[in-house]
Image (cartoon, helix red, strand yellow):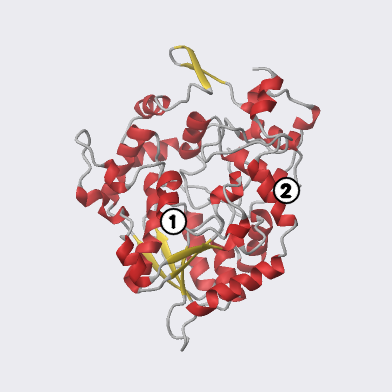
């Protein structure tokens, strides 16, 4: 493919293309909608946005101070520390933390989660779905539409809503909206809230729990019922709403993580497949086989997301971002044997299934067992800046497995 065609499909500022799975448009100047919405971060009055946030949460404060004011979904990675910091220390709310156990836990993630609830002195509810059901669901979603993370996304987005209904706590506070941050699906000023439709169409790849039940699989009602979104009557009776902190606070994950590392001892670790060592340190799978599947299906992986974000924040040039993508994009998987052992499949059989989900837009197979990738990192020419690019991320821990072949199911408290 020629450079002219490449640039017609790709943003001139970041590395995203029109094939982004969330949907992306490129304007007449060659700039994508995600970059255009990111420009709002430099022109919005964030003091006024914070005042708007305080006004919004005020009616949800417990009058006597003895009840939970809101729900905050958390994990041992991502933006959990920063969201709880804002909710507890900046807004002065009393949150109930909720956590869906993905069963892909690293020791560092368990430590981070325990440290989180202790540092911020918060109560937490943890959902542990029957691990045999989780395994059956993962086998089904992997075969049907190439996802080993559906159950994580489904559980992480439904358990907080179920808890809001069950405990009659109407306000849920999430971090940033993925569609806004990546592709400019909305403006910050739209103040878009979490919805059943966005969850189904994007988080769950168009498949609700009931869509997994087919005549050709082994899943039953007992496997999937805990992933059902509450009905409208139940939601309306409590007045459940989910707001995104990123609509009211200037969102900058690198700066936020580094602040939480310094202030609250958030633990980070290096990955082979990206330069960002702050996100998703709680999972052996996210930056491993899940990331490989993303590359197979969409022609790009998480390192591109990280590079685009850093380009938009002005910490990398486009050329430097592309160099980091080339360096990390096809790094070998480090925890494939662990995943195979957990799922109960042979590595060669698993690879056969994975290959069924390669997109012909990005992968060609000239002969059996040989694949050629044609993503943006292979189409655009390398430059002298490819050597020695440093994105400025620093790990303070590791993801070492310590010889164990088992995922950590339930973690003990951190002393």
Quarter of the view holding residue 343: top left
The percent coordinates of residue 200 (x first, y second) are 40, 47
Query: How dense is the environment of label 1, judged by Cα within 10 Å: few (below 14), some, or many (20 and up)?
Result: few
Q: Is residue 86 left or right of residue 221?
A: right
Query: Which residue in the protein does label 1 denote?
Result: 195
Q: Quadrant of the N terminus?
A: top right
Query: Which residue in the protein does label 2 denote?
Result: 392
> What residue is shown at x 47% (from left), y 45% (from top)?
284
Cα distance in 3D space between marks 2 and 1:
35 Å
Query: How dense is the environment of label 2, judged by Cα within 10 Å: few (below 14), some, or many (20 and up)?
Result: few
Q: Is mark 2 on a helix, strand or loop?
A: loop
The percent coordinates of residue 404 (x first, y second) are 41, 47
Name which of mark 2 and mark 1 comes first in the sequence.
Answer: 1
Q: Does 304 sit above or below residue 199?
A: above
> What residue is shown at x 51% (from left), y 63% (from top)?
243
Q: Which residue lies furthest to the right in this view?
A: 384
């Amino acid at each position: 493919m020629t450079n002219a065609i490449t640039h017609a499909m790709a943003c001139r500022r970041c590395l995203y293309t029109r094939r982004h799975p969330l949907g992306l448009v490129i304007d007449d100047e060659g700039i994508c909608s995600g970059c255009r919405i990111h420009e709002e971060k430099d022109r919005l009055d964030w003091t006024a946005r914070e005042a708007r946030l305080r006004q919004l949460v005020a009616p949800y404060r417990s009058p006597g101070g003895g009840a939970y004011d809101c729900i905050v979904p958390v994990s041992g990675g991502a933006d959990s520390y920063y969201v709880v910091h804002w909710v507890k220390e900046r807004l002065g709310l009393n949150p109930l933390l909720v956590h869906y156990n993905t069963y892909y836990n690293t020791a560092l993630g368990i430590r981070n989660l325990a440290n989180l609830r202790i540092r911020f002195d918060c109560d937490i509810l943890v959902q542990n779905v029957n691990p045999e059901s989780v395994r059956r669901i993962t086998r089904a979603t992997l075969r049907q539409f190439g996802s080993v993370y559906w159950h994580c996304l489904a559980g992480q987005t439904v358990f907080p809503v179920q808890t809001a209904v069950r405990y009659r706590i109407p306000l849920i506070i999430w971090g940033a909206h993925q569609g806004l941050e990546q592709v400019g699906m909305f403006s910050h000023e739209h103040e878009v809230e979490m919805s059943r439709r966005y969850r189904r169409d994007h988080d769950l790849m168009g498949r609700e729990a009931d869509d997994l039940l087919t005549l050709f699989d082994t899943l039953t009602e007992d496997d999937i019922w805990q992933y059902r979104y509450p009905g409208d009557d139940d939601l309306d009776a409590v007045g459940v709403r989910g707001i995104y902190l990123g609509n009211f606070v200037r969102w900058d994950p690198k700066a936020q993580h580094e602040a939480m590392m310094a202030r609250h001892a958030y633990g980070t670790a290096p990955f082979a497949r990206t330069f960002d060592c702050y996100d998703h340190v709680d999972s052996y799978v996210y930056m491993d086989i899940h990331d490989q599947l993303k590359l197979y299906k969409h022609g790009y992986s998480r390192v591109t997301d990280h590079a685009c974000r850093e380009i938009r924040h002005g910490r990398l040039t486009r050329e430097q971002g592309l160099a980091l993508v080339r360096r990390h994009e096809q790094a070998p998987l480090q925890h494939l044997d662990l995943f195979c052992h957990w799922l109960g499949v042979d590595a060669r059989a698993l690879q056969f299934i994975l290959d069924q989900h390669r997109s012909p837009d990005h992968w060609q197979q000239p002969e059996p067992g040989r694949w050629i990738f044609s993503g943006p990192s292979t189409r655009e020419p390398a430059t002298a800046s490819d050597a020695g690019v440093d994105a400025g991320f620093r790990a303070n821990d590791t993801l070492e497995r310590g010889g164990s072949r088992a995922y950590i199911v339930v973690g003990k408290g951190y002393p």
